[in-house]
Amino acid sequence: MAITRITLDAKTPEILLESTTTGGLYGEDGTESSDIKINASEGVMEARNNNGVAQVSASGVFCNNAGTQAVAASTGIERKAAIVGLGYGTVNKYDWENENFIAGVYGYSSNSGTAPAYGGFFQDILISGLILKSISVSDSSGTVYLSKSDSFILGLTNSGVTKTLYLPNDGIIGRTILAKQIGQGTIRFYPRSGQYIHDDSTQNDYYDIPEGWLGIFMFTRFNLNGSTRDVWTVSMCKFR
């Protein structure tokens, strides 16, 4: 029998379950006994064993034990994590720009203070397939003001057509945008007010990406001649 004792503590107040196992179907700490408690004074639900602790509260979710198997045994490999998200479901596609989707984990953040806000932070990240949020710019497009959610720009303008785009202004150092011009026209990038574009030590008023070229824009901040600048650095490369 997995549960050996249930304790109701009206003074704390707390409900404590003492178990001889850990983790259920996907946990890898099965031989470890564990304590599961609901503590009203701390406002937390907690599961703890000798390997770590997991807590759920109104403040968030915390776990410091990578003891949950993330892949099926039939794969012949082991991938363990502290938090596993498997996003199975049914969602119909949105034909343009993948606005409809299913995700195993979805992260979004907003900060009312002055520090940057990230949807997720990873000390080291292993990417098995990279997908960038993209938009297309064609002859019929108006002036485009890019937001922080735009990562890849596909230029489709035809010969003699130049379309104007303004780079994001959220000011997060390290933000990266890729822009590829496929059509025979041009896509032209401007910084927002108070920001600059540099491909070297000299400022550019704007930057054009012509046919066949890929522009790589990265936001940073540095001192130039004693003045601090918010700068979009840009590099360009071609298919050959």
Image (spheres, rainbow, N blue to C red):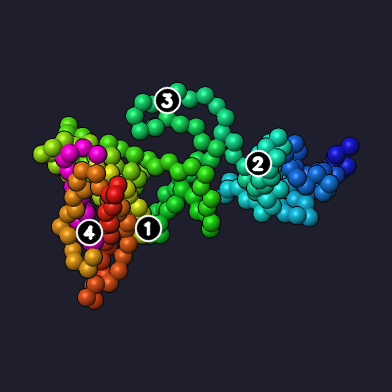
Q: Is residue 100 magenta?
A: no
Measured Cα–Cα span from mark 1 to mark 4: 14 Å
Q: Are marks 1 and 4 in contact (CB under 8 Å)?
A: no
**Which mark, by number, is residue 70?**
2
> What amino acid type is highlighted by mark number 2?
Ala
What residue does disc 3 label? 93
Tell me which numbered mark, 3 or 4, is placed earlier along the sequence.
3
Image position of 80 (left or right of 102): right
| Rendering coords of residue 62 (x, y %) | 62, 51
What residue does disc 1 label? 174
| Crowd band around label 4 with a 10 angstrom C-alpha radius: few (<14), some (14–19), many (20+) | many
| Rendering coords of residue 204 (x, y %) | 17, 60
Measured Cα–Cα span from mark 1 to mark 2: 31 Å
Measured Cα–Cα span from mark 3 to mark 4: 37 Å
Q: Is residue 159 above or below residue 193?
A: above
Image position of 92 (left or right of 68): left
> What amino acid type is highlighted by mark number 1?
Gly
SS for callout 4: strand
Stretch in magenta: 182-199
SS for callout 3: loop
What residue does disc 4 label? 197
SS for callout 1: loop
Measured Cα–Cα span from mark 3 to mark 2: 26 Å
Q: Are marks 3 and 2 in contact (CB under 8 Å)?
A: no
